[in-house]
Amino acid sequence: MQAVKYARAGSVEEAVSLLQDGGDGARPLAGGTDVIVQARERTRDIDLFVDIKHIPEVVGISHGDDGSLTIGAATPCYQIYGDETIAANYPILVDSTSLIGGTAIQGRASLGGNLCNSSPAADGIPSLIVLEAQVEIAGPNGRRTVAVEDFCTAPGRNVLGAGEFAISLHFPAPAEGSGARFLRFIPRNEMDIAVTNAATQLRLDGDGNVTWARVAIGAVAPTPLLVSAAADAIVGQPLSEETIAAAAAASSAAANPITDMRGSVRQRVHLAGVLTERTIRQAAERAA
Amino acid sequence: MVTVLIPQPLRTLTDGESVLTAEGHNIRAVIRDLGRRYPELAERLVNGSRIGRGISLAINGDVVSTGLITKVPEGAEIAIVPQISGG
Amino acid sequence: MASEHIVVSCTINGEQQVFLANERDSLLEALRDRIGLTGAKEGCNNGNCGACCVNMDGRIVNSCLVMAAECEGSEIRTVEGLASGDQLSPLQNAFLEQAALQCGICTPGFLVAAEALLEQNPDPSEHEIRYWLAGNLCRCTGYDKIIKAVQQAAGQSVV
Amino acid sequence: MVTAQSPETEKYNVIGTRPIRHDGVDKVTGAAQYGADISLPGMLAGRVLRSPHAHARIVSIDTSKAEALDGVLAVITNADFPRASDEVIDTGEGTAQLNWVLDNVIASDKVLYKGHAVAAVAATDHHIAEDAIELIEVEYDVLIPVLDVRDAMVDGSPLLHDSLHTGEMDGSKSDNPSNTASHLQFTKGDLDAGFADADVVIEREFETSMAHQGYIEPHNGTAYYRADGTLDVWTSTQGAFVVRDSVAPLLQLSPSQVKVTPMEIGGGFGGKIPVYLEPLAALLSQKTGRPVKLTMNREEVLLATGPTSGTYMRVRMGAKRDGTITAADVHLAFEAGAYPGSPVGAGAMCALAPYDIPNQRIDGYDVVVNKPKTAAYRAPGAPQSEFATESVLNELAEELGLDPLEMRLQNACVEGAQRADGFTYGVIGNVECLQAAQDSPHWQSELQGPNRGRGIAQGFWFNIGFESSAYAQVNGDGTVPLVLGSTDIGGTRASIAMQLAETLGISAEDVHPHVVDTNSVGYTQVTGGSRTTFAGGWAAYETAMDIRRQMEERAAQIWECDTSDVSYGDDAIIRGPQDEDGNDQQFTFKELAAQLVTSGGHIVGRADVNKTSSGPAFATHIVDVEVDPDTGKVDVLRYTAVQDAGTAIHPAYVEGQMQGGVSQGVGMALNEEYYYDESGDLKNASLLDYRMPTALDLPMIEPIIVEVPNPGHPYGVRGVGEVPIIPPAPAVRAAIANAIGVHMTELPMSPRAILDATVLEDE
């Protein structure tokens, strides 16, 4: 473990100033399941942890009167998948949060942390993208909001500037007739990083036409990808073998992966299609 | 009399013979007897007071663990095998 | 590069503890090196094996992924806190009766994790047990007897 | 819980029952002390600097900055050790050259794999030790790494060792240096004639990856060199005496100066036989005069401790239309890692061991590559070689339209059959295992559903015996402390104590087994090779017989009669002649125990045995899988493991060994691999990416224990630990072929590999 100090922030303002004063070596600490490992294995220079999970605004779940949802960035996964309203209205968030790590990881890890760690293979981000989530960021110049698909910029990198950190995620109310599904492919049944993952949200009208869709894929590019071409392939008509296959092909075409110990280029390109197809079908089942 | 089975790679030391017979009440005596006809073989099978490097001997299917003084029953079959380790 | 020491106060197995830790210590290191509770084990030190599982404020966590400094004011339960005196818990007894351990290094983590499962789900299915315990690796048993021990502790009939 | 004894063990009182293991309470309360749990006054923490390169010459090492860091008390390199000779030392069940042992512990002129130890520090705190190794400056001359066993064997390949020449079994050496350390060969019959006799011949090539033992406890070693020149070592090891006999010569100490205390051990599977940290801790302690503890992290374990060999294998096998196997030709090239000593010999001897094949040739090559030095791993060598041969046998059965189980029965070795290496079988349970599998509910059931398949495979392992020691005394209350030298990795305190209890006619609970240090018990070989319950049980039996004799003598003294008139019955009643009044004289064990102290003192029984009649083990496994053709993922649906245990002393722990072996075998079959990049960097050195099965990856594993008692053991014990890791990979391969019609040729049969062999094949 690097020589790292610890500070517990009691408010957003305090966290911002701690992070700002701490400079490049200061990192927000939520569940710690990524940053503590990075500090220990010296894969990232960290000399200060700013613990943000005791800030009331940064932890917890609130449901708006309009059906929208706000999740504190440091809210641990188990609270998210244990929330009955989320399970009913945003089951895709249960998909993601219940397969990040194992039970013990889920006791600490958060969606905000998953997002800010900005791994190309993050299992939270594709779901956030297809749900059109917005991340609220606090920093020295006040607050700003960024669409999740614009958040990650490179492996381990994102739009957060000096002294900034994510405080919450906002989700619009699910539209009538919508359904969403997240799937990942891993060699085991648990505990692995995704070889490839995918999420789809779509809306069906009364006639079974897809009126709107979003498809996102992960672990196939430097950042999780919103694949508009895949969505375009299914929107405006009822789902069919042909449209689903076209969407899958669009995802495979959009994939630009690398070969590493978790998967090969052609495996990932192939799986992007397979998972796109499967999430579309299963999102449609949920929409129906 | 005992029978000694010679694995293929050691037959360079036995003029190609694959099965030899020998006399002896223990391993040392058997090897000494073999050495009268096949001195290079005997040299390979003994390393000072021990059985030769990297090999084991098995009497009737049981690997010898008590070295050159291990008793050899009359009529026994001796095999020459590589050392085995277990996990 | 020098690191300083910090004072942490928390409740461990029902006892109020105040201890001195290196500010770089994880909860696992603090438990083992500073407090002398060596029941939680280091298997991987990055959250992938579960040998260091402890219960923190009612949830199981990998104590290697918690900084000691984070524990200020929290309530920690370790494998050492499962038995009361020489009375083993039903889960501990079940592990012994089902021969659910071989080398025993993963056992503390499994016990802490399985107890947390039974607290929130007293009658889990085999799949629920396997899912809950997927973050705890055991290399000796093939998991059969561990699953059966949890089933036994849950009062289920075990073949 | 199943408590009924098997028909084979019904005649016993203790054997075949399932008592609570003696060390159990300590292990469920967290009280058990494993190697890393030790804490000593004044103890320092050590840390090892490791090579970032797979193959490089060390130009220079500058430790000055590390030494200057506050809190650092010593920094050592290979140069600080006494020069090691090329003498051969006993390293457990094998031997090794002392200088290679040292060079693997800490590199001398070259680093030979990524993670090879280069220097070690001792500091007041492990955080400081970690900082200190970052300050050590090493200049390397990076060399081309040799990473593939076939490339390594080619003339002109870069050499790991300039002094290594290929050794033949006859003692001759190759003229030119080579990465091939040795070649061995076994032959039987006439190979060409055998193939000419065959109606069908199948030839396949296989590649398997290195795979790690994966014990959950990382290596550790604590040493304290005292002012009087004695050295104490505490460590998690499979063999305390091996540690003593390795550390002593490396530090040029007498074995009598070194005491090794085996701590509880968190798994080993063969990987905790070699020394890694103990010599470093010892030298650091010698330099500082304080106890030093070294522990590895998981990355170090995967980078630098023994995995099992990766291989290239080729098998050609021929059979007649009726299923008779006529010939088999097996070529095995095993990666030894950085220094010679792969398990290719055992692999070669096991390759065709279950089958009576008249014409055979088996060639084996031990090849060094720039990867960690391999160590024993559960039935070392056999999971690879039998994967190759069992796989080809399954394909032959498929080609001939024969039931693969029937075909095995048809060719199975029985008592009197001789292997190519010259071994002749005594009483074995090969056929009995196959028959039990045939009769099992699993084999009798029908598998339904798309993309599902069933596979079967057989496994063979020798089991070993060797030296074990024990002693026990009889306390006044009739309890018996039993002192052992065998590290208890999986319940052997219980299985050995049960054999003592059985022999004495007392309960398992009245025996209190203890594992002690190397000064407190006679020489005992490693816990490994499936030998511990066999040989430890022998020692316990002899110890108990010694006690029985002494108790007969004591009773004779008390009754003032001839010892020959006293008999110790198997019911633990000591019976003497009638007394002067014509009354029967007898003691129960406890009654006589209570009188020992007043009738001449306590009784201590002891034994030191060196047995090799360990009795081979066979196993038959059946597996059902489902393959996802779109992702290449294999799910294991159902698993049955049949195995001959000889006599199952503690059936629950026999089952546990079978289930655990299956789990490791399935891991090797499906996902476990060493993933290197072209520079020799191991890219998956974590338990995240070295994927061992989780609880969610396996179904319940149905164990069927067959008992064909070993005539070479008083209770018929055969080793049980190793053979169950062998059949899973070929059985899973057959099941995959049965499910989707593809015959895989590599291990692991990962989703990536299966996709490459199926939907992505033409791309």
Image: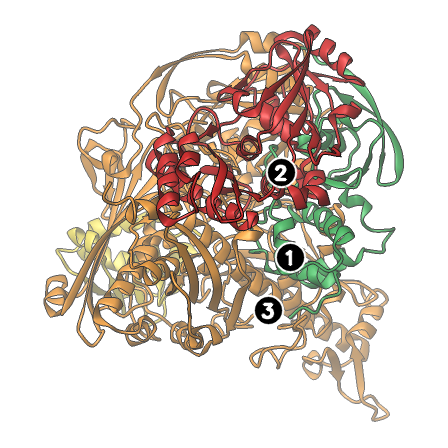
Chain colours: A red, B yellow, C green, D orange
In the figure, residue D47 lies in which quadrant?
top right
Marks 2 and 1: which is nearer the front? 2
| SS at mark 1 in the image | helix
| SS at mark 2 in the image | loop
**Quadrant of the frame with the C terminus of chain C:** bottom right
Same subunit: marks 3 and 2 = no
Marks 1/3: CA–CA distance: 21 Å
Position of residue D257 in the picture relative to residue D561 (left or right): left
In the figure, residue D265 lies in which quadrant?
top right
Q: Position of residue D306 (x, y in %)?
A: 45, 39
Residue annotated with mark 3: D649
Position of residue C102 in the picture relative to residue C84 (left or right): left
Q: Residue at x 66, y 58 (%)?
A: D471
Residue annotated with mark 2: A174
Position of residue A220 in the picture relative to residue A19 (left or right): left
Label 2: how many Cα within 10 Å (few below 14, some 14–19, many 20+): some
Marks 2/1: CA–CA distance: 42 Å
| SS at mark 3 in the image | loop
Residue annotated with mark 1: C146
Q: Compared to D361, does D69 lie above or below?
A: above
Q: Position of residue D532 (x, y in %)?
A: 55, 58
Q: Chain of mark 2?
A: A
Is residue D332 visible to us here? no
Viewer-proximal residue, D185 or D429?
A: D429
